[in-house]
Structures are given as structure tokens and as C-alpha cells.
């Protein structure tokens, strides 16, 4: 636990143990390792000031990473950042430039649609697809383990509907 105004004494240990997972969750939402690392920094700063029990750290950090990454998508800051870094992005070796453009556009559409889902569905979907078990997702989101599958399926359906709605209106 953090003492008054200080940083919790277990921060370094939790950071070493959970950093890769936090970056992984954020990267799954954002598609950018650099942005995911920025999210991880923000999440660990918040965790360092928190009184979250050590036993709940993994779930708390995963949810915080998903929320923070979704906030980036929803706020539109991601677009400005992507445009700034596009010029210095490392070249990707692809067989067909058209295929690369289509893949990039598809990923962007999926991320935008994910940002329009109800928050709890979006977070459950991200956490489950980031490798958390049903039990871990349930604990992290304070849900019953039995409702995780239903929530994830609803999120997948809602995501498909969002993609279809915007594909037909675009």
C-alpha cells in the first residue's frame, strides 16, 4: 500500500511482473507498441499512487490499460499522434502495397468500432483476447465468471454490427 503521498513499496516488483501484460493489452487496442508503452507508463503511475491490494494488481492493471487505450481511441488524440509519426515509421516489407493498405485500413476500422462499443463490453473483449482467462476477466471487471462469455459474445456481435453499419454508410 502507498503511504501518505508516497509511492507504494511494491511498485518495482509489480512493474517487473506485469509490464509485458499491460503493454500487450494496450497494444491489442491501439495497434502501436510505442503508444502502448505510453499507456503502460500512465497506468503504472496511477497504480503507484493507488492502494490496490497486490493480489488484485494484475486485473486492475489490465483493466486500466484497456480503459486508457480506449480513451485514446475515443478522444481522437491517437489520430494526431499517428499522423505525426507516420513520416518516421519504419518501412514494412510487404509483397503487395495494396494488401498492406487494406490491412491497415481494416485494423483502423476495427479499432474505431471498438471505441464505439459500450465500455464494459469493449474492455471484456480486449481482456479476453489479450489472453486473460474467463476467471481473470470476471475478477478484473467484478463480474460472475459465467457472464464473461455472454458479455464477450455480445461485444463480438456489437463489433460486427458497428463494422457493418459504418461499412454501408461509408
Image (spheres, rainbow, N blue to C red):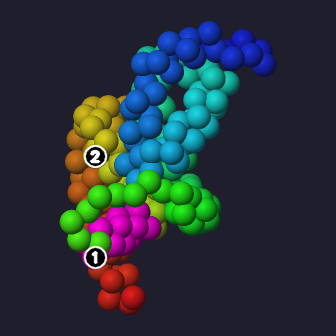
Left or right: 69 in relation to 113: right
Provide residue 118's location: percent of width, then percent of height.
44, 61
The residue where tag 1 is placed is: 98
The mark found on residue 129 in the picture is: 2
**Image height check: is 170 above or below 21?**
below
Q: Quadrant of residue 144?
A: top left
Near mark 2 (Cα within 10 A), the count class, few <14, some 14-19 or many ≥20, is few
- Classify mark 1: helix, strand or loop: helix
Identify the residue at horizontal 56%, vertical 22% (top origin): 52
In the picture provided, is 29 more to the left or to the right than 144? right
CA neighbours of label 1 inside 10 A, class few (<14), some (14 to 19), many (20+): few
Question: Which residue is farthest bottom?
Answer: 169
Residue 13 rendering spot, x and y as whole percentages: 50, 12
The magenta stretch is: 98-114
Is residue 107 inside the magenta stretch? yes
At 64% from the left and 15% from the top, the residue drawn is: 8
Q: Quadrant of the N terminus?
A: top right
Amino acid at each position: 500500500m502507498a503511504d501518505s503521498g508516497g509511492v507504494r513499496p511494491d511498485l518495482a516488483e509489480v512493474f517487473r511482473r506485469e509490464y509485458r501484460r499491460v503493454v500487450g493489452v494496450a497494444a491489442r487496442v491501439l495497434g502501436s507498441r510505442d503508444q502502448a508503452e505510453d499507456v503502460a507508463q500512465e497506468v503504472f503511475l496511477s497504480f503507484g499512487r493507488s492502494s490496490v491490494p497486490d493480489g488484485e494488481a494484475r486485473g486492475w492493471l489490465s483493466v486500466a490499460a484497456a480503459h486508457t487505450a480506449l480513451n485514446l481511441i475515443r478522444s481522437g488524440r491517437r489520430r494526431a499522434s499517428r499522423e505525426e509519426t507516420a513520416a518516421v515509421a519504419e518501412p514494412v516489407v510487404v509483397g503487395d502495397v495494396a494488401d498492406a493498405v487494406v490491412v491497415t485500413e481494416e485494423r483502423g476500422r476495427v479499432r474505431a468500432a471498438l471505441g464505439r462499443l459500450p465500455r464494459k463490453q469493449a474492455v471484456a473483449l480486449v481482456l479476453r483476447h489479450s489472453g486473460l482467462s474467463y476467471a481473470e476477466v470476471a475478477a478484473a471487471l467484478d463480474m460472475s465468471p459465467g457472464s464473461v462469455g455472454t458479455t464477450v459474445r455480445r461485444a463480438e456481435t456489437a463489433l460486427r454490427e458497428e463494422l457493418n453499419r459504418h461499412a454501408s454508410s461509408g
